[in-house]
């Protein structure tokens, strides 16, 4: 997709001022015109991004959109072809051990340290950080105190993921990268995990997460960036993304001859009129607005 198409789409969808390219003095991450090519394939095609200190930023996009490539460049694990990147004020391509100690990384599901208990794994890795959090404090923070003496290969999937996060936050990072943190979690474990992420955010950690779960982005993120075909096509709060905040509501109910619905920007008025018409309860009444998933799918459709 070309830049003109992005501009056309954003005007069409009523995106309020496309925050792509916004600058600010308080950026934990600042990316300009980032590019990366694998052979003939342009995986990242000119990404601009700002992530503010203290925010939770979710990067969403379809498989192969370029999320992991971008994030790994920010983490200093992948070389870029072009563009400017600053993470905590430093170019990751030239970062030293001091900078590495200021960031935390939680990769997609790992199976390392299978024979170590959480206490042993954390104590081992604490030695690599200049000012690690106390092991007991980290265990408490991630809810693994009860499992501190259980071998990692005997932890459940959700507990194992908590250990991954524990290792990611052990060095007391200012910025935490979380790659698809809750893939494979049951709904209860996912909600508990969200609480953990919110606690970390409450302690002042800036968090960049990638996710395929719109509910997760909606619940956690201060802002969401949508990446498609190697470009950031929109950045906004979950409630405003894609003109969602200004979208019409759909009122639906069951009328005498079957289901009915109407789109309106005055749903309260419609509901009041329906209540009068029905003389009380309106059968199967519902008022809905586009979900984050609705606007996301619309954007991705427009971007491909
Ligand atoms: P997913 O949601 O599936 O994890 P993603 O958005 O993280 O996807 P990337 O992993 O960044 O996407 O991949 C972007 C594109 O670059 C894809 O087309 C992928 O096939 C390609 N790619 C990624 N890594 C390499 C590599 N090491 N060599 C060649 N091509 C690669």
Image (cartoon, grey):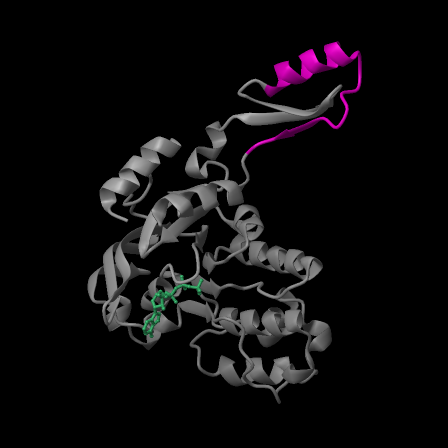
Q: Is residue 294 left or right of residue 78?
A: right
Range covered by the magenta-colored residues: 267-289
Closest to the observer: 299 or 98? 299
In the depicted structure, whether residue 212 falls above or below residue 282: below
Quadrant location of residue 189? bottom right
Q: Which residue is pictured at 28% across the width and 55% down the height?
A: 31
Q: What residue sits 43% from the left and 54% below the top?
A: 61
* Front-most of residues 93 and 7: 7
Q: Quadrant of residue 41?
A: bottom left
The correct choice, above or below, for 24 with respect to 109 in the image is above
Position of 117 relative to 273 (above/below): below
Which one is nearer the viewer's eye here, 114 or 101? 114
User: Among all residues in the image, which is located at the extreme front?
Assistant: 257
Viewer-closest of 35 and 38: 38
The residue drawn where x is 39% and y is 68% is 102
Q: Is residue 52 visible?
A: no
Percent across and percent down for residue 19 are 33, 40
Please report the residue visible at 69 percent of the width from the left and 74 percent of the height from the top: 156
Residue 212 located within the stretch drawn in magenta:
no
Question: Image height check: is 88 above or below 133?
Answer: above
Rendering coords of residue 40 (x, y %)? 23, 68
Q: Position of residue 88 (x, y in %)?
A: 33, 60
Q: Is residue 273 magenta?
A: yes
Where is ligand 1, by quadrant?
bottom left
Where is residue 55 drawn, in percent x and y?
45, 50
């Amino acid at each position: 997709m070309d830049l003109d198409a992005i501009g056309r789409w954003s005007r069409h969808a009523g995106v309020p001022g496309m925050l792509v390219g916004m600058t600010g003095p308080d950026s934990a991450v600042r990316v300009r015109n980032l590019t990366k090519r694998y052979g003939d394939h342009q995986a990242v095609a000119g990404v601009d991004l700002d992530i503010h200190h203290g925010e939770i930023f979710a990067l969403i996009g379809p498989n192969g959109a370029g999320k992991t490539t971008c994030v790994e460049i920010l983490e200093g694990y992948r070389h870029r072809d072009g563009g400017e990147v600053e993470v905590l004020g430093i170019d990751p391509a030239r970062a030293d051990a001091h900078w590495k100690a200021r960031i935390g990384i939680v990769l997609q599901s790992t199976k390392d340290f299978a024979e170590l208990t959480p206490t042993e794994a954390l104590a081992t890795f604490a030695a690599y950080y200049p000012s690690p959090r106390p092991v007991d404090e980290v265990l408490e923070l991630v809810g693994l105190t009860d499992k501190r003496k259980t071998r990692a290969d005997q932890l459940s999937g959700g507990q194992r993921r908590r250990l991954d996060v524990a290792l990611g936050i052990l060095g007391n990072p200012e910025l935490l990268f979380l790659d698809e943190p809750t893939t494979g979690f049951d709904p209860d474990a996912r909600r508990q995990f969200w609480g953990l992420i919110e606690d970390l955010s409450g302690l002042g950690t800036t968090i960049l997460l990638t996710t395929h779960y719109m509910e997760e982005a909606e619940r956690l993120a201060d802002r969401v960036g949508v990446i498609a075909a190697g470009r950031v096509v929109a950045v906004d709060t979950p409630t405003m993304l894609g003109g969602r905040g200004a979208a019409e509501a759909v009122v639906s109910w069951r009328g005498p001859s079957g289901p009915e619905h109407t789109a309106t920007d005055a749903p309260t008025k419609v509901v009041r009129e329906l209540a009068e018409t029905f003389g009380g309860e309106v059968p199967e009444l519902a008022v809905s607005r586009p979900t984050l998933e609705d606007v996301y799918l619309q954007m991705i459709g427009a971007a491909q």
